[in-house]
Image (tube, rainbow, N blue to C red):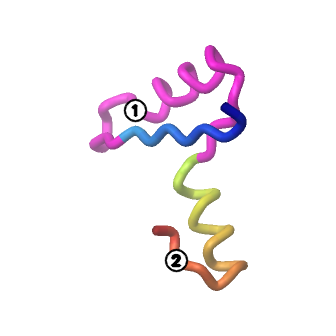
Amino acid sequence: MKNRVITISREFGSGGHTIGKMVAEKLGIPCYDAELIQKIAEQSGFTPE
């Protein structure tokens, strides 16, 4: 499998960002935070969805 997308739904203060980083590191895949996705969406004209 070449492309993988894993999304983690979380609430503020739940530690989801930390867990996401750890999972990505363990699987050897990049971790993209919503901040990066928002920035790319703004530059490309596409919506984050």
Q: Secondary structure at mark 1?
A: helix
Task: Name the spot of residue 12 as percent of width and height, x first.
Answer: 31, 43
Residue under the point 63% across and 78% down? 42
Residue under the point 62% across and 73% down? 41
Q: Nearer the viewer, mark 1 or mark 2?
A: 2
Against 48, residue 12 (above or below) is above
Instruction: Using a 10 Å C-alpha cutoff, classify the residue at mark 1 as few (fewer than 14 neighbours), some (14 to 19) or many (20 or more).
Output: some
Residue under the point 51% across and 69% down? 48
In the image, farthest residue toward the front: 1
Task: Name the spot of residue 34 as percent of width and height, x first.
Answer: 52, 54
Q: Disc 1 vs disc 2: Cβ atoms closer than 8 Å?
A: no
Give the mark count: 2
Tell me how far mark 1 sits from mark 2, CA to CA.
23 Å
Who is closer to the viewer here, 2 or 9?
2
The dot on residue 5 is none
| Horizontal relation, residue 1 to residue 23: left or right | right
Which residues are the magenta region? Answer: 9-32
For residue 8: magenta?
no
Task: Name the spot of residue 9 as percent of width and height, x first.
Answer: 33, 43
Q: Secondary structure at mark 2?
A: loop
Kindly identify which residue carries mark 1. 16
Against 14, residue 25 (above or below) is above
Amino acid at dot 2? Thr
| Horizontal relation, residue 2 to residue 41: left or right | right
Q: Determine which quarter of the picture holds residue 40.
A: bottom right
Quadrant of the rendering where the N terminus is positioned: top right
Instruction: Using a 10 Å C-alpha cutoff, classify the residue at mark 2 as few (fewer than 14 neighbours), some (14 to 19) or many (20 or more).
Output: few
Kindly identify which residue carries mark 2. 47
